Image: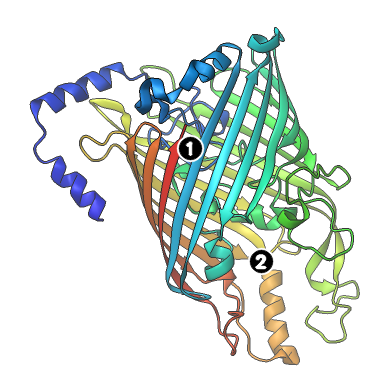
Amino acid sequence: MGILLLHAAAAVAQPASDLQSEARRIAAEEPAIGSEAGAGGDPQTSVAQPVFSARRSAEVTTSIQDLLGPAGDPGGYRAYLRTRGIVYDLIYFTEAVHTARGGMRRGTATLGLVDIDVDIDLDAFAGWKGGSLHTTFYQIHGTGASRSFVGNLLTVSDIEALSASRLNELWFEQSLFEGRVAVRIGQLATDTEYMVSQTGILFTNGSFGWPAILATDITSGGPSYPLAAPGVRVKVVPNANLSFQGGLYDGDPGGPDRFGREPDPQRRNRSGTRFPLSDPALAIAEVSYAYNIEPGAKGEPGTVTLGGWYRFGRFNALGQDANGRSLADPASSGVGRRLRGDSGVYGLIDQTIYREPNDPNDGASVFLRASGSPGDRNLIDFYLDGGIAYRGLLPGRSDDTMGLAVGYAHIARGAHRLDVEAVVLGEGPRPRRSMEAVVEATYQAVLGPGVALQPSVQYVFKPGGGIGNPRDPDGARIRNATILGLRATIRY
């Protein structure tokens, strides 16, 4: 709030020289709508897509090198590598997240992430037309608020993960038919391309990126931050508006837990170099249509996406064993009956609702996403989120973005029924899971090329879906939580 007041005060009286400078900046800007800079590899349709994001689906081009002048590229090595088709980026995220009220306990989590990306254009490097290589490496340090303080399903931070130095993606892509078809093979992440909202990448809660229903229901969270998995993806772009993509991936990026001793996939695959290949596969496919992206289009631009996933293999039912007994029954085997396959469907819309008349790269966008999965084998059977963001609302702050978003996860009826049966069958009073929701308000202030500061406030309803607090001797439900965050980002 203090930042907003300072910006507003500074904007009350804008000198004429500043107004002239602003006019020159607007005239020099390339149109964002319809460009290839849209998050997730689709045309940009959200005018409020932020300059910075921790989502790997985002297209971030601003760099602190622009501030440093000649000192930004000592010896000219970076420029030389670029002429040979080699481009590298380094991004550092650091944040402090304070659980001010509620959750499992109060406290502050600090977390840092070094994200190193290397891209090689094989045409410029070796004369291989249409070929490219990519790799991503992470160095993660610190602790996460959801794991240590809140206990919720809709992860407080999109960079929360166990401390580790790990390989993420490592793939080769071949473009065919003048770029209309692209085949990618290697170590792949799905959260960079599927169910991506260009407006939603502003928010720091992890569920506004890779949503909680996918992170919870797909084995080991699926190939998503910080894990990737071997796979192949094909993308077809018949024209500028339409795209189809689908992929087949190893179904457990953590690799199999052969001895049943380590349920955490991040610990099973600590360095990201396990490359599992023996697990039942995960298939994902989606189609996206971008409209009103042509210059002079009468309506505001937007994107509609429909998709789904299927996980091969067998899964345990949530509530009953093979004999039909409740798993809460002392006479039960304690193992859910085996069910074949798992799946989910989803849809999203990103819609620009207002563009400033004098600056068409500033304005407001909204997003809405929904997803469902079978409730007999998944903890979350329905998920919904949405929000609004405005880029350039304050005078003189064209690159800043502010937003408000809400996410809701419904606990499957099978899990809720199991909680009720546990009470009836004599386990004593216990909370009954029903839902979890989060509200986030955030403001991303771009301080200069490659530098940003982003405060946020989150309020979590029924953390964990309404589970008992493991730190409470009486097993009372984890209280609703108020969470304050501050993130700094530097990109080189």
Q: Coloring scheme of the render?
A: rainbow
Residue 303 placement, left or right of 442: right
Asked if residue 85 is positioned above or below residue 63 in the image, the reply reads above
Residue at x 27% of width, y 26% of height: 359
Asked if residue 35 is positioned above or below residue 276 in the image, the reply reads above
User: Where, quadrant-wise, is the N terminus in this rendering?
Assistant: bottom left
Residue 227 placement, left or right of 46: right
Residue 120 placement, left or right of 252: left
The image shows residue 381 at horizontal and vertical percentages of 65, 60
Callout 2: SS:
loop
Of the numbered discs 2 and 1, the one sitting upstream in the chain is 1
Quarter assignment of residue 475 = bottom right
Q: Is residue 374 visible?
A: yes
23 or 267, nearer to the observer: 267
Quarter assignment of residue 411 = bottom right
The image shows residue 222 at horizontal and vertical percentages of 71, 48
Dot label at residue 281: none
Q: Mark 1 points at which residue?
A: 198
The image shows residue 290 at horizontal and vertical percentages of 51, 28
Dot label at residue 412: 2
| Furthest residue in direction front, as rendered | 75
464 or 420, nearer to the observer: 464
| Amino acid of disc 2 | Ala
Q: Can residue 292 be seen in this view?
A: no
Residue 260 placement, left or right of 479: right
Residue at x 74% of width, y 36% of height: 187
Asked if residue 444 is positioned above or below residue 474 in the image, the reply reads above
Residue at x 50% of width, y 76% of height: 105
Callout 1: SS:
loop
The image shows residue 462 at horizontal and vertical percentages of 52, 72
Mark 2 vs mark 1: give the one in front.
1
